[in-house]
Amino acid sequence: MVPVGRRFCTARGTEWDQGGIAGFDGMTDEQVLVYGRHLCAEVVKTGQDVYHSAPAYEAVGLPYSVSLAQALEAICPQAVGFREAGEERERLAEEREREELERRCVAYPPHRPRIRPVRRARGTVETDYHALVAHEEDELELIEAGPLRVEGLVGAEPGLLQITVAEELSTVCVAVEVYDRRPPLERRGWDQVREIPYRSTRGRLEFVDFYGGKRLGDLTVGGKGRYRVRVHVRGSEDAAEQWDMGAVERFLVMVYPVDR
């Protein structure tokens, strides 16, 4: 195992550090460590981690760089503690925000189906790229492919369904209802209603949270084959204009097989 001091010293001179540690070229390891320990002490004074303590670098006359900050963590455990504590605070804050959104979504009056669905579910889903995504394909392949080019509210290709959301990055309320036959058309109370064909490739279509990996609903009751997907949305305008006040866009997605 390389000693922690040595790990700090060997990081100098890398091509991708934009000049930070390269400034130590020509110094002995002992000289570099003196700078490092001095910098660590200045970072600790700020009470911040090595990535958010610009005054510390200025105090010792070193330009900030990511590689220098990363190397510094090897000899500055107090700063690592600051970073970990900050990350935990952020995680807890995001968790509280998500729980509040979940409570808000559940508090909305539930949809009353006109015929009995085979199954139903609802909850919050985090979205990105203006896209609420349900898919059946490999997760990594989906990420590499990126979002579909969807014109209007909803689009699909075999194994992938994508619904347009108002905000580029947001949490939305989603209710799904799965039927074994065509449900009655409902428009009252919804800003938009659109229905499109969809072909299931594996027989298990699910909405996927972009960041938490949460899955909502098994939407393909009849296995692989042809389906119709009907999407209802309300609150898009409020979500786009009042996102900072907690406005939440709401979706109802009905899925039923055809030719069964």
Image (spheres, helix red, strand yellow):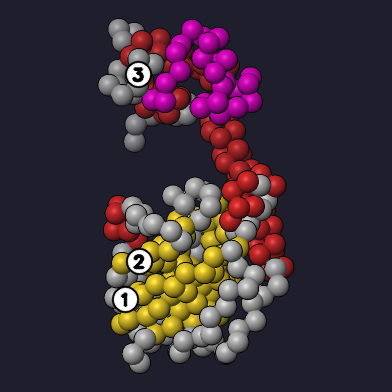
Q: Residues within 10 Å of mark 3 (few under 14, many from 20)?
A: some
Specify whether residue 159 is in view: yes
Q: Nearer the viewer, residue 138 or 76?
A: 138
Q: Secondary structure at mark 2?
A: strand
> Magenta stretch containing residue 44, yes or no?
yes
Residue picked out by circle 1: 199
Q: Residue at x 31, y 10 (%)?
A: 25
Q: Residue at x 38, y 57 (%)?
A: 150
Q: Residues within 10 Å of mark 1 (few under 14, many from 20)?
A: many
Q: Answer whether labels 3 and 2 touch (C-beta < 8 Å).
A: no
Amino acid at circle 1: Arg
Q: Left or right: where does residue 143 sit relative to residue 122?
A: left
Alpha carbon distance from label 3 to label 2: 44 Å
Instruction: Where is residue 2? Give x, y as percent.
Output: 34, 31
Amino acid at circle 2: Ala
Dot 2 or dot 1, earlier in sequence: 2
Alpha carbon distance from label 1 to label 3: 50 Å
Magenta region: which residues?
A: 43-67
Q: Residue at x 49, y 7 (%)?
A: 61
Q: Answer whether labels 2 and 1 touch (C-beta < 8 Å).
A: yes
Q: Secondary structure at mark 3?
A: loop
Residue picked out by circle 3: 18
Q: Nearer the viewer, residue 48 or 28?
A: 48
